[in-house]
Amino acid sequence: MAADGGNSSLQLPCVFSPKSRQYLALCAQDSRLRIWNTDSKTLQQEYVPSAHLSATCTCIAWGPCRTVKEGPQRKKRKSEAGQVEEKADLLAMGTAAGSVLIYSTAKGALHCTLDGGHNGGVNCVQWHPEDSLLYSGSDDTNIIEWDLQTGKTRSKWKADRAAVTSLCVSPDGKLLLSAGQTIKMWDLDTKEVYRKFTGHSTAVTTLRFATTRPPDSNGLYFLSGAAHDRLLSVWQVREDGKDKNSVVSFTLTDEPQHIDLVTSNSKEEAVRLAVVCKDGQLHLFEHFLNGPCKKPMSPSCTVQMSDTKDSPAPIPLLAAALRADSRTVLLAYGNHLQPVMEKVEINTAERHVCLTRDVQTSLSLSMETTVSKVKTPIVNTKSRVLVPGLPGHQAPVKGTSQGSEKRKKDTDTKEMSIAERLGEIALSSVSEKGAPKGTASLQTDNFAVLLVQGLESSDASILNKVFQTRKEMVIKKTVARLPLPAVLPLVEEITKRLQGHPFTAVLMVRWLKAVIMHHTSYLASLPDLVSQLGVLYHMIESRVKMFHKLTKLHGKLYLLMTQVATSDSSTAVLDVDRTAKLVYEEESSDEEASDDEGLPHDDSDNWEEEEVMEEDKEEQADEEEEEEEDPERRTDSKANGEEDMEHENESEEE
């Protein structure tokens, strides 16, 4: 049975060799194939594909172990005639360019290349358990059956509307499982669909047969895992065809990354399962497959690893292989570039097991002399290695063609000191906008070098000068030109300054933003990133919590103040209205009052009381006599006016 080859392109391939588990094959971030010996814990072989940068390795599958046979098998296996031991030799690697590489561990070189079949990247490869056949699934939705004796395509057919992300061949070699999101079972003799299953909502990354029984016995089971899915689903191949839904589910803490299982040969034999999740935990299951089970199955044992530091950090598990003994498990943990392999006895009676290991001491860097003759020099911890070509030691100055020779001589002969560079920074903050372009590039180079010098010497004056800049482009260029060893000290310095005065925190946030934008990939590759950035994360989180409370308080105070302001304004308006009425009564004159009283329809009686009117009857009689004299004066004036008009008319007639 071939080992798991259904790794998705998002995961780094990591597979143990079948049966003896003597080798561990990994393709790390640099796309190199490394084969480690699990017994001696050394690097056995290393292979660099010719196009490893343009065509990265996406999946790995070991070929089946075979004994020595006569005939053409002797040429392919390159095995000795007297050897009877079964040994893993061939290794298939699918690439993003659409080709499949066959590597021979016996020769230590490439056996052959299978290309020209796929138009998209290869997502999965699977070996036939007996014949010299290989199956590959690709983004172009096709499955290809390769003949390894000729190195050519034997059959090709369209499997699905979507990309084929996982394959698995049955133990008897008669059936093939393929999956994108839906799962199909193919008859390899006719290349026709034997069964269809519902599948998952996301791309299926793992397919494995769990039993070795024939499909017409209702005893054939297989399991599947998908991306971003925390369940492993088990499917039963039923004789009546009513098998579209899964019958058992295994619960996980994250999506499955590596799966190893011991198949069940009968109903009385349980299936043993070891699943390494993306979060680095190992889950062990043991279950008797006998029909559907409604409740999801939880792991019988969960294994985690951590280091031996004061504040322990988790060590991610890469792969796990079950041994014949039910208690022993072969683990690979640590880094993909330099994994640590160990056989561990696990007490499965405990639900949770935590193993503590010192990765630095247990990490084996020894490499067999047949692989490489390069010797690594022993470097003392106190010595410092200077890297040539650090930007800023000789900054290019871009000037106009006129007088450029003089400028070149000056820059070549004169080396700026740290004090002069600090002066340049102080001048640049006061300089006008119309400065020449050459000085801008010079200042950015100086910023990078000064920042490195300030971080190495812990000089506060240099760091203060550098951190005073407010120009976004200068900050981005300075951070982009920093060497990688200076990134972590810069983050620590920014964290210290963020805890100080809020004015400096505003400036430090700009630097922190630039560091995260330019150096995310480097920071993500650090193994103890969580502990180093923990202070920064907690500080930002606490400040954000306070901001939320302050925003609530600000809203309540604003609502209260607006209510107080509106109530004050309403009382002020009422006072103004009252004063206006009083002012209107005071402005009435005596003459208007005397005229109004003489009118026939006068309402002055409403304003005076009856008692006052009885007392002043005599005064009113005097006023009426005066008013009677007034119309006589008015008639006299009218008569005089008419006489004047008549005189004027007579003069005009004359």
Image (tube, rainbow, N blue to C red):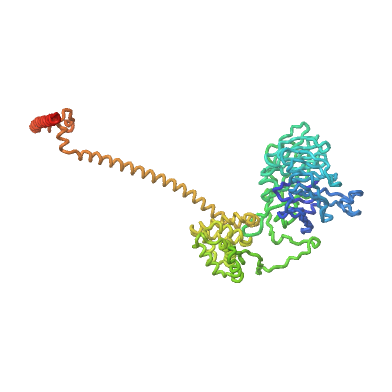
Residue closer to the observer: 324 or 466: 466
Residue closer to the observer: 411 or 305: 411
**Figure check: 308 above or below 583:** below
Picture coordinates of residue 82, whole percent (x, y): 91, 54
Q: Quadrant of the N terminus?
A: top right
Q: Is residue 153 visible?
A: yes
Q: How many marks?
A: 0
Residue closer to the observer: 381 or 634: 634
Picture coordinates of residue 536, whole percent (x, y): 56, 56
- For residue 184, which quarter of the picture? top right
- For residue 617, which quarter of the picture? top left
**Figure check: 538 above or below 246:** below
**In the figure, is residue 529 to the left or right of 138?**
left
**In the figure, is residue 112 to the left or right of 444?**
right
Picture coordinates of residue 395, whole percent (x, y): 61, 65
- For residue 622, which quarter of the picture? top left
Q: Who's the residue at 49% across and 51% down the image?
A: 546
Extreme residue toward the bottom, this view = 413
Residue closer to the observer: 39 or 429: 429
Q: Is residue 312 visible?
A: no
Q: Quadrant of the C terminus?
A: top left
Picture coordinates of residue 607, whole percent (x, y): 18, 33
